[in-house]
Amino acid sequence: MKLALLLPLVALGCGGLFGLDELPACPGADNEFDEDGDGVVDLCDNCPSVANPDQANRDLDFGDQVGDACDPDPDDVCIVHLRALFDGFNDAVGSGSRWAVGNGEWAIANGSFTQSNGDGRYFAHAPMFRFVDQHVRVTATVSEYGDGVNDRRGPAMGFVTDPRGADVGNGYSCLADTIRGNHEIRLQVVENGNDETVSVESLSGLLTTNAEIVIEATSISTERSCSASQSNPPVATVIPATFNDPRFTEGEVSLTTYDAITSFLSVDVVVPTGMCP
């Protein structure tokens, strides 16, 4: 696992991200980490959790910081995205300063943010990162599933508007769910600590323990969408942006586990900042 790294919305001097045609060697590159193994260290990678050695970015001339391989709108060159946060959980001090634990047994070690209680719903959130419009890509593995006492089992991520101690508060979440033999992606509204499924799609295969799961969620204005995938064995499905709800329009990134011992490996947050000139 790789260096937990914050990429704020300012130029860091890496040409491939910030406007130069050539990508120079990054300062301290020998000591940096490469989350996706594509040969570009995270500090200068425009898709730090998706391998893209060519660093292709058709929006680069407009100031976009997100490569085509992970761009939420890869076919629309007139939407400019900036990276608000990338965390690979290799720096316990740095990552620990970003994430607030609501409840559960969370620890940052060995390149992951792990919640080690397999029974119950537990969450953490990033209070410094709060946006109206955002796209979040999370990678995680589940080492053990509990008995499903919450009628849900698996990792989830989403946007929470008002976390309150051990109560996840209000917002939305996308859950890769394995309850009762059904393998699904759920888009949920969380209100006053209660989960309500508003859309669900069956996964194309079975989620397995210790396999890397990717959950992506988008919140644009009042529209929400989410997807889940697993490479081995292959699993994929998408809930399109058909759910419209104006109740909670701004939120912090949140990570949740439902009856599952889960290690979150990376969190990548990008935000649309406007249209091209």
Image (cartoon, rainbow, N blue to C red):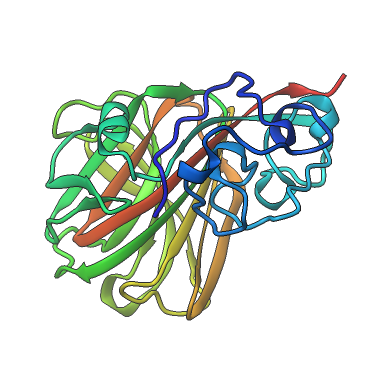
Q: Is residue 268 left or right of residue 118?
A: right
Q: Position of residue 118 (x, y in %)?
A: 14, 61
The image position of residue 50, as x and y in percent, is 59, 55
Q: At x 28% / y 70%, what residue is drawn?
A: 179
Camera-nearest residue between 134 and 34 = 34
Up-down relation of residue 62 to residue 196 (above or below): above
Q: Is residue 197 visible?
A: no
Of the 4 image quadrants, the one containing the C terminus is top right
Does 116 sit left or right of 22 as displayed? left
In this rendering, position of residue 139 left or right of residue 98: right
Judge left or right: residue 118 versus residue 192.
left
Quarter location, residue 271? top right
Residue beneath the point at 39% across and 40% down = 4
Residue in the image at 48% along x and 24% along y: 249
Nearer to the camera, 208 or 251? 208
The quadrant where residue 78 appears: top right
**Coordinates of residue 116 in the picture (x, y in percent):** 15, 56
Badge count: 0
| Residue 95 in view of the camera | yes
Residue 6: percent from the left, percent from the top?
45, 30
Asked if 115 appears above or below 102 in the picture, the reply is below
